[in-house]
Amino acid sequence: MTDQENNNSFSANPFAALFGSLAEARKFVACHKEQQTEDYSGGNQDESDNSVSESLDDCDDSVAEISRSFRSQQEICEQLNINHMIQRIFLITLDNSDPSLKSGNGIPLRCVYLEELGSELDGQDWLDMDNVEQALFTRLLLPEPEKYLISMTSSGAPNLSAERDAGEKRIIPFLFSCFQRSKKEVTKVPENLLPYAVRCKALAISNARTVLLTPEIYQGQDIAVQLVDLMLEGLRGANFDEVTEFLEELIEAVLTDEEVRSFNEVFRPVFDVLLECMQNMDLCQMLLYQYLDLLLYCTRQKNIAKVFVEYIQPQDPTNGYQYQKTLLGAILNISCLLHTPGVVESHSYFLNPSRSSPQEIKVQESNIHQFMAQFHDKIYQLIKNLLQQSPDTKHRILSWLGNCLHANAGRAKIWASQVPEIFMQTYASDSFFLNLGAALLRLCQPFCKPRSARLFTFNPTYCALREINEEARRSRNMHMKGLDKETCLIPASVDQQPEFPENFNLVTENLVLTQYTLHLGFHRLHEQMVKVNQSLHRLQGAWRDAQQSASATAENLREQFERLMTVYLCLKTALSEPQMLQNCLQLQVSTALLLVQIALGNKGTEPVAVVFPVPDIQHSALAFVPEFFADNLGDFFIFLRRFADEVLETAADSLVQILDFVTAFTGSVERMKNPHLRAKLAEVLEAVMPHLEQVQNPLISSVFHRQHIFCSYQHAAYLAEALIKVFVDIEFTGDPHQFEQKFNYRRPMYPILRYMWGKENYRQSIKNLADYASENLEAVNPPLFLRFLNLLMNDAVFLLDEAIQYLSKIKVLQIERDQGEWEGLSPESRREKESNLLMFGQLARFHNIMSNETIGTLAFLTSDIHTLFVQPFLADRTISMLNYFLQHLVGPKMGALKVKDFSEFDFKPQQLVSDICTIYLNLGEEEKFCASVPKDGRSYSPMLFAQTVRVLKKINKPGNMIVAFTNLAEKIKSLADRQQQEEETFADAPDDFLDPIMSTVMYDPVILPSSHVTVDRSTIARHLLSDQTDPFNRSPLTMDQIKPNMELKERILQWLSQRKQQSENTSSESL
């Protein structure tokens, strides 16, 4: 029979229509001949088979062979449908016949032709369940499958999609596509083909498992990259559910067969890929967030999450920088901050800020904040997923956090900021801790809600637990290390032992981890920002001066300013993300509430009412609370006041807790031992109180709510006392090297006192303190307000005296420069002069600011407090100080202070003169005070007051003030004349009548108990305000220990009376 006749014969057979082509039918028959022959020879053919054969006897031989090859038409259909289904799922075929001879029936457009496999199968050109596994494996081993693509239909039109799908080189995407296609087949095939479709789906998974377990078999395939790409493509598209289903089944398959390679070994390469891709990504890069979503999936899958927490363990857990090199560390290291300190050239944000308008900078900042909020949320979700996984995964991530913080504890040390090169190689970056802190802040929000009962389950003994082993850490939920070495708010008493629970709750651990992270991150960044801000002001001034003098350094200074402004804007943007600030605000308010409750001894889960004075608590748990809790709180509110004031106004309702905290801790060494930390709380008080001066700018927030909270605070009296208490305590820190630091601590206290003085409830509480001091002048311990006034005058004298000296030096340097004396100097000498001028200017400005504050404070206090100031020991000091200042401000020495541009150095001579005159007028109503003025032999003279009147007229002070001061001057002059006569009368007083310190006649002599020296009561009273020791032998001494020397007093009074009588008689005789 010819080929043409054979084809016609097949075409006439009705069963041939079930094949894709006549060639399929013909080859199918040939393949089954031998099997059919064996069946016949065995004599087992049943009657139904015979009947089918007989019914076909009249047809051509080929038709008969086809009919005899199958028991029924159903089997033929099933086998053909299986072949087509395998082709559709795996896009492979053994049939290379003419496409025009193939018919539809769901045949794919393109398939990979497995010619070698067909040869191995003796020319079989169809796929079945017996050979599909081998066929798929063969397909996967093809290095370039696109070379074996054939068309399965007669359509000659190119189809890129079909060619791409069938010729896919990458194994994992190919198997995933097979998985997808098999799922579709499962939903649409007839019931009899369903088991085969399910098996094909399982084949896709089992082969993917083989790929993961033995990737070395498949050359040229980067399996880990393909897995990552698959998940990314799923995230970008709408089929991520299918990707996750594929991965879930694949993971389950791998877990059941870990003999060749463990699940950990399988997935670690995936994280290697992610680490390489993410470690240099940019915050505003969209791809970053797709990678983060991928990691979020990984951390939601318990088995992958377990691999993740093992993968991120650093090589050296004791090296802080090693944590940054892990995958989680690489993510945390992404931010808008500079990667290398000072290097802005390759940075992506705020380049050349001087060329951008404020609005453009604001828009860029807002855009970065949007990305930051999203970024922080992803990190938070990632950590939260790990905490919610198995107990082992939770333990591993908490251990990672605890070990990381312990290894980076050195970030908080002072030297770390001074050696940036060593710092960068030793510790994780600022970005790392900023982002970690933002994520942990979100974890704390559930128990930071107002009146949250969970907050009070915090157990401070967590911070007192010493080193324990790994198993104990797991069982007790205690993963931080080294906290027992931290300085706590107060020292524990000798007999105080912490009562540790069996295990600590997550609230306790979260709060400690978060606060310590903020201590290492936010705190340090805030310090950097303040320093950069100060440097910008200095550079701006130097740049302006260089421009005015046409100096060659102007351009260099401009470039420095530009670079530093980039650093500043990046820091400000990183620290001021709105959601992070709100979360931190909630945490710090909750911390303030918690610490006050601990101070009250509350051990319940509901807050108790705050009462003042706070009762003394035996064995207070504050002994287990590290100082960084309070330090973080203070640092955050100071930051808000400087750089994000609007946040404070929105949180006004929460500020009562802050006022309670400041009131309870600022003035109490029993609750906070560190005087420097208590002084810092004064800055917190300045931060939360309303501004004294309001800028007329719609962008500046209103202070209405803060004013209401501050003025209606029910414990106002105790708050004012606490402020004055810390003002005094900061004088006695025991550190002689921090003498100047006390002025920085007191700086914010002055505007607070001024504001308080303007509010009746606070003003009355301050006056009550003054009244108590007046009534207890000789108490064992000098009254608080008396010590406060003494220190206030000490500060005023020192500060203004220093300012005067610096201004004098500045004037000399300015004259030398203006007269051209610097022109002939060597470059080094000129730089030294310029440096000195800059340094003296900064020092003069600081001391002027502080002296303005101290004199101003005395001015408003004396408006309503007189009794104390007329006491001899205070009156003498006050008058001596005021006259000394007037000498320099209005007297012959004033010329030495006439520097260029007073405002540059905050020198306000007119205001100082006005305040000094105000003090005189306030106290001038007291006769005792006026009588003490002429006794100031060093500075007082009638001419000095006359010069003061002339200056008051010159600076246009109100007429009533000028008249009042003129009258006071005349009154004091008449008293001076009278005293002059008395001094002449008493000039020859015996030595034992004279005070050994002041060399003046004693009016109230007292005996010092240890040295037995007799001094005037006013002299020793003034001395004991500053130093409670005997001035002659340094023995401890208080006013209650001195004894009146009545015998000497009687002799002095008798002698004075006699001298007066003699003087009067002499005067009468002369008349």
Image (cartoon, rainbow, N blue to C red):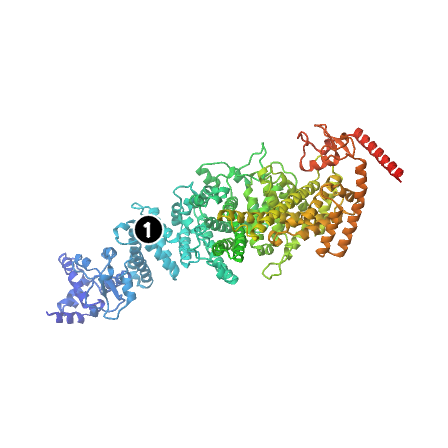
Q: Nearer the viewer, residue 557 or 569?
A: 557
Residue shown at 78%/44% (left/top)? 930
Residue 786, compared with residue 913, is above or below; it is above
Indicate the quadrant containing the C terminus: top left, top right, bottom left or bottom right: top right
Indicate the quadrant containing the N terminus: top left, top right, bottom left or bottom right: bottom left
877 with respect to 623 (left or right): right
The answer to whether residue 1008 of the structure is visible from this angle is yes
Label 1 packing within 10 angstroms: few (<14), some (14-19), many (20+): some
Q: Nearer the viewer, residue 255 or 411?
A: 411
**Numbered disc total:** 1
Disc 1 is placed on an element classified as helix
Residue carrying label 1: 253
Residue 982, given in percent of the width and then of the height, sits at: 81, 38
Residue 927, given in percent of the width and then of the height, sits at: 80, 44
Q: Please, what is the three-letter code of the amino acid marked with disc 1?
A: Ala
Residue 245, given in percent of the width and then of the height, sits at: 37, 56
Outermost residue on the left side: it is 1
Residue 16, compared with residue 944, is above or below; it is below
Q: Nearer the viewer, residue 349 or 891?
A: 891
